[in-house]
Image: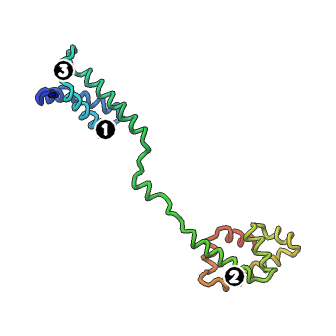
Amino acid sequence: MTTTKTGERALADLQREHGPALFHFLLGLTFGDRQRAEDLLQETLVRAWQHPEAFDAPYESMRPWLFTVGRRLAIDARRSRLARPAEVSDAVLEGAPAPQDTADSAVRALDVREAVRTLSPEHRAVLVRIYFRGLSVGETAQELGIPAGTVKSRSYYALRLLSRSLPGYSSRSSSSSSPRMADASATST
């Protein structure tokens, strides 16, 4: 069984005569994507090469056959692109946030809890309400039944004691690493 293919000369004539018009037609179907239009043009010409019987069709020109094949190839290519998940470029991956290491924050939380346990009950009560429960100075004073000035004083001295008992932590790094601590500290003064 032999398969006949379109001759080189006939294919070259076909490309010369209909190639530019077919390319512009495919360019419109691909919304201006030159690379895709060129790929579709090449695939259309391959189909013309594989089907020499199309040259014997009762048409005056091969253009309708070429445009039909090109349009069907464009539709198939679009459907297959839509069926696949979108490709992710390196730029998207570089912009994604790096996974956080939770071990460091867990160790810091354990250190802080242990340090808070070493405080006197009065100091601990003030810090727990202000920094862990998010109460204001006034709310803390009302809940504990003490003046607001006493709440401020106890929170000040409790934080000083914590900064001494937490080796490797400075008051600046602890307040910058926890915006809530910084907000509560500003509220308590």
> Residue 54 at x, y = what percent?
21, 21
The nearer-to-camera label among 3 and 2 is 3
Whichever of labels 1 and 2 marks the residue nearer the N terminus, that label is 1
Q: Is residue 144 above or below residue 36?
A: below
**For the residues marked 3 and 2, what is the alpha-carbon distance in whole angstroms?**
90 Å
**For the residues marked 3 and 1, what is the alpha-carbon distance in whole angstroms?**
26 Å
**For the residues marked 1 and 2, what is the alpha-carbon distance in whole angstroms?**
65 Å
**Residue at 43 percent of width and 59 percent of height:** 94
Can the viewer see residue 63 in this picture? yes
Residue located beneath label 1 in the image: 36
Name the side, left or right, on which 157 lies relative to 179: right
Q: Is residue 136 above or below residue 111?
A: above
Whichever of labels 3 and 2 marks the residue nearer the N terminus, that label is 3
User: Viewer-proximal residue, 40 or 29?
Assistant: 40
Residue type (three-letter) at the residue carrying disc 2? Leu
The nearer-to-camera label among 3 and 1 is 3
- Label 1: element kind: helix
**Residue at 32 percent of width and 27 percent of height:** 71
Residue occupying the far left of the picture: 9
- Mark 3 is surrounded, within 10 Å at the Cα level, by few (under 14), some (14 to 19) or many (20 or more) other residues, namely some
Residue located beneath label 3 in the image: 55
- Label 3: element kind: helix
Residue occupying the far front of the picture: 1
Q: Which label was assigned to residue 162?
A: 2
